[in-house]
Image (cartoon, coloured by chain):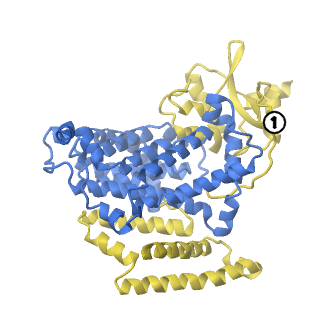
Amino acid sequence: MRWIKEIGFAFVALTLLFTILQTDQLFHYFQTIFLFKIFVLVSIPVIVLWLIMTIRDYLRRQGIFYYCIQKFRSLSIPSGAKYIIVIVLLGNFIAIGLGKQRYPFYDVGMYRWPKEYMTRDKTVYEVKYYYLHGDDYKILELRKESSLLLAEHFGWRYSNDIAYATTYFHKGEKENFEYLSHEMKEKGVDTLWAGVHSFNFETHELTFDPDICHAINVNQTADFYYGPLYIPTYQLEKCDGH
Amino acid sequence: MGINIKEENILVRMEQPGSAYQLAVFRILLGLQIIYSSSAMIFDYVQQVPDISNTKNIFPGLLNQWVDMIAVPYLQPITQVLGIFLVLGLFTRYILPVLSISFLLLFSFYFSRHNAPHPWLYIWFPLLLLNFTKSSDALSLDKLFGLLKPLHGTSSKVYRWPMEIIAAWMAYIYVAAGMAKILPIYKGLKWLDGGTSQDMMYHRFLYSMDFYLFKHPFFDYTQNQWIFIALSIASIGLEFFCIMILFTRRCHLAIFILLMVMHFFLYLTGVLGFMQLALILSISLIHPAFFEKLFTPQKLKTSSV
């Protein structure tokens, strides 16, 4: 029971400490936001009290921290491993505390920044590359390609990370298009065009519009995840010609 | 039935009997993942697209320049080949230090160009740890060719501590992910309003496995805030629950099932790549006795008699 209390108190104190450490404009907020000032003024005594109690317990050879350190030191594991474990523990503790990453130490904060909840447009749009296949067209589904069972073009080396990069991270760059275009040419697809895929969450209506001029318009106006897609010059020129 | 933390915690478990087979299975799966990850097209790709990441690492600038300008074409095949050696368990003691260095450098380049934590986050520390273990005492060519002298028993405690440390690594990954979402506290409260989950599920729908397989969303992502709030609370709750790995074994099965459910749901809604890595680390959550029974059927027969 004592350990649970100690862990709980440590969690609260560290959460307060990390909140202060991760506030970029601490002094500005302290001076301008009354509630934040109260938060800091309450947090500091709690953190100091936790530190005093932890150090006191350690010196009295009691408490969870004393137990963990002594038990860890007594373990019959290679000393090299012990040093590595301690270094990695400290490195990651600092990364979590500061909310910053320095490879390979990581705060595991890839989804840390909040987005506001909102009632969204019933229709979601995505501009995607496609190619002509006989009289029909086929969409180049960049993320489906990373699934071994569903892939149609790329092999097992097209893993999740490159699928993420081509679909989102670098979608607006010419080099991304050139890379995909080159890969598709090797598979016998000469030209990639951009079209508009859309889905209505209310009616469940799914459409793909291969109109190249419409794709250019939608690409410039709609709100897209990671911004608009790169549209090749030949598509822009062909559309201008119309 | 209360949990006795003092008797069941990870530091106590490290001194209990382990399984050479469990460690060997982990070594093989980790090796396969390293071969797969280091063979990915991403390394060619990130050299062709602009560098838009703003990431930092612990290595000196000169080393980073060397990796960036010269070493990647060599590091990639070296990591692949040494990964094969790791799977086979051949010259394991000698290849592991080189593989650890080549993996760390190769993925420092990857992270510098492609700001994503998988797969290296799950792998780098367990790989480093294997350097200090007897991971090729079973299911290895080292053993087959007599290149090492295995311990007399396969259930010594020298096989246990690495698996427990790897379990602790798993706890760190998920608890830190939970901490990152709630810190700083004023931002954490905002995170719980479900907006992040909604943004991800709404925008990724047309590129999600759910769409590719079923063509229908689980529900209307344009509204239903309460579902997004519930999903956000559940994900943070589960991530914090993983801290129980450190205190007792009793929650391991529940943690494993819940993590797999979470990763499978994320996989369907457009967050790919984490499930197989979580599965590899989950080997550490299985009791060593299971592997002893699995690989030494005589023991099973004898005990049943």
Return the x and y of residue B197 as percentages of the image width and height: 67, 50
Measuring 58% from the left and 53% from the top, which residue is drawn there? Answer: B235
From the viewer's perspective, is residue B105 above or below residue A93? Answer: above
A200 and A219: which one is in front?
Answer: A200
Q: Work out whether residue A134 can be spotted.
A: yes
Q: Quadrant of residue A233?
A: top right
Q: What is the letter of the blue chain?
A: B
Chain that appears yellow: A
- Residue A109 visible in the snapshot: no
Q: Position of residue B191 (x, y in %)?
A: 67, 59
Characterize the local packing of mark 1: few (<14), some (14-19) or many (20 or more) Cα atoms within 10 angstroms.
Answer: some
Q: Secondary structure at mark 1?
A: helix
Residue indicated by mark 1 = A218
Q: Is residue B271 left or right of residue B301?
A: right
* Left or right placement of residue A215 versus residue B231 in this view: right
> Relative to residue A173, is residue B190 depicted above or below?
below
The picture places residue B187, in percent across and down from the top left corner, at 67, 65
